[in-house]
Amino acid sequence: MLDTKQKENTHRNCFNPDCDELGIYPAPKSRENLREYLYFCINCIREFNKSWNYFKGLNEQELEIEIRKSTTWDRPSWKFGTKTLNYDFERAFKDFDEQKKSNQKNNISKKLQNSYKLLDLDINSSLDEIKGKYKVLAKKWHPDVQKKEEAEYNQNKFIDITNAYKAILKSFTETKK
Ligand SMILES: [Zn+2]
């Protein structure tokens, strides 16, 4: 319950039209307008914080900037009424960070998929199959066995195959860890 002093300080009603409580907790109107506030009661601002996605609509570069801001503690004035309510921002940031890490994981697996493709191997190939295949391809594309006029081009092919093979081997040891 609000005491008299709080009532005197806040003559606004909660922004939620269905709510009869006083609006004492400020929330930024929008991401573009962090200094203008709407005022809610404690229950409504909790709801507001849950649904307010600070990062929504930002492109990747803008998100990077926001992350950098957060990691250097150079935070703009988006502190909400109480410490508890600030939690949702922290969480949104954490969620985004995790999302980013998982995207990176997907990129690595895509790279790995390309390595398998380059060696003309199935993604489920056994280690023996991979080694066998590499042996055949390395022999075929090794610069020593190439015609002189093709050697330069095929040297790249040999390097590509070797790099792909290394990447696949590495993924094998990483899975076993
Ligand atoms: Zn309310």
Image (cartoon, helix red, strand yellow):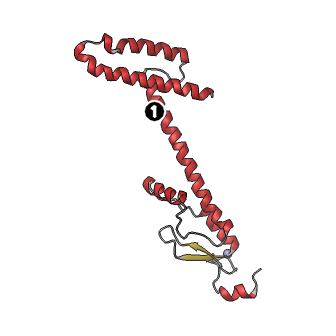
In the picture, measured across the screen, residue 32 lies left or right of residue 10, that is: left
As drawn, 64 above or below 79: above
Residue 76: x percent and y percent? Answer: 52, 68
Residue beneath the point at 52% across and 76% down: 36
Residue beneath the point at 40% across and 22% down: 161
Secondary structure category for the residue under label 1: helix
Residue beneath the point at 47% across and 34% down: 110
As drawn, 149 above or below 172: above
As drawn, 169 above or below 52: above
Q: In which quarter of the image is the C terminus?
A: top right
The residue that disc 1 covers is: 111
State which quadrant residue 128 falls in. Answer: top right
Residue 135: x percent and y percent? Answer: 44, 13
Residue beneath the point at 44% across and 55% down: 59
Which is more toward the observer, 112 or 19? Answer: 112
Residue 117: x percent and y percent? Answer: 43, 25
